[in-house]
Amino acid sequence: EAIQQFVGDEIPTEILKEIIAETLCFDFPTVKVEEGIYALELYHGPTMAFKDVGARFMSRCLGYFNKDKKDNKNTVLVATSGDTGGAVASGFLGVQGVEVVILYPSGKVSEIQERQLTTLGQNIKALKVDGVFDDCQDMVKKAFLDESLAHHNLTSANSINIARWLPQMFYFFFAYKQLKSQNKPLVFSCPSGNFGNICAGIMAKKLGLPIEHFVASTNVNDTVPRFLEKGNYDPKPSKATISNAMDVGNPSNFIRIQEMYHHDLELFKKDFSSFSYTDTETLDAMKSIYKTDGYIAEPHGAVGYLGLKNELKNHPNAIGIFLETAHPIKFLDVVEPALNIKLPIPTQIESVLNKEKVSTKIKTYEELKAFLG
């Protein structure tokens, strides 16, 4: 029902139910980390990251709309700072009438993330961009405005596409369902880069889900924490961190959040806080969580935990939930040395480790345009 009102009559109810069932065919457990604090694990899908939800939903919707079109191809153009690329590649692999082109920043994604988006072949193409995520995102946005590319029927699988973003509401409802018997207010902390997750959570709240407060936990790319503190929205170029999926200088979903609060900063602050953390603080949190609770948090989850701990001082009776957005194995080069452990390789990851990476290097928008043809 949460998503039906947005879909309307575009997809028949029975087909929509099938799409949702296929999208949500894995678990979303809330795992107790310490008293009053839970991790909402979003990494039990095929590419072991939360983006599996939106990518699977969108790919199946596009497959439905394309099913009777013989010659009309779509090109899905997507920028990734890490997990989006792998999830979109997996979700759209083999979908009839769809070609996928993924732009990712060279040297700014983990080895496993790169393998997930460069080894599948078929209708999946990867472009290795000499730049940062914001450069990739700017190229994608420019392509959508380029009338000379209209014949490609371009669409996005980034969270600017509502079919990719809206399904992220689902797991806020799942967390509530698992914890509502405790009869306590809920505070959600979302590790935030492009701000899609927290934006979807706010949408769930607007639809009636009883959430007391949201925390946008960021790394040193702190555009939003600075905005809340000073009232001046001043994006800066992104900086590389160990929580690379959040290395975003100008989060594209933040305008949606501002619109939902009618650009009223004081009203916004009643529901929303934001804090930023350094790599050193992130590593210290990972070690502390593991030593104290035996829980393995990867860098993004650790940032979410830090923001949650900070905000819970203002909500002493609440249950805190931080989003664990990707499996620790996706950041084993950070997790293993930090915690002095050896992570077992899940089967979902093992399947891509020995495949050949195939990508095309580009630097400019003109090169992207030439690639698309």
Image (cartoon, rainbow, N blue to C red):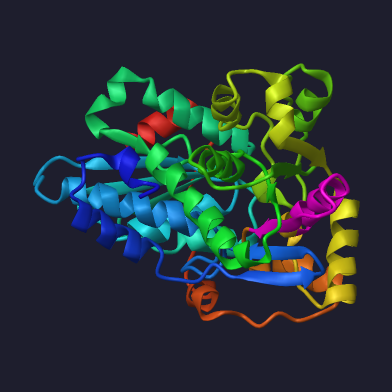
Horizontal and vertical percent position of residue 338:
85, 68
Closest to the observer, 3 or 146: 3
Horizontal and vertical percent position of residue 103:
49, 43
The answer to whether residue 366 shows anywhere in this view is yes
Q: Is 323 included in the stretch rendered in magenta?
A: yes
Closest to the observer, 241 or 274: 274
Residue at 46% from the left image edge and 34% from the top image edge: 160
Left or right, 272 with reference to 123: right
The answer to whether residue 237 shows anywhere in this view is no
Horizontal and vertical percent position of residue 242:
77, 53
Residue at 41% from the left image edge and 37% from the top image edge: 161
Quarter in which the C terminus is drawn: top left
Q: Is residue 262 above or below residue 121?
A: above
Q: Quadrant of residue 37?
A: bottom right
Q: Is 68 included in the stretch rendered in magenta?
A: no
Residue at 63% from the left image edge and 53% from the top image edge: 109
Q: Is residue 215 above or below residue 120?
A: above
Residue at 59% from the left image edge and 52% from the top image edge: 82
Left or right, 150 with reference to 110: left
The image shows a total of numbered marks equal to: 0
Horizontal and vertical percent position of residue 269:
74, 29
Magenta-colored span: 302-324
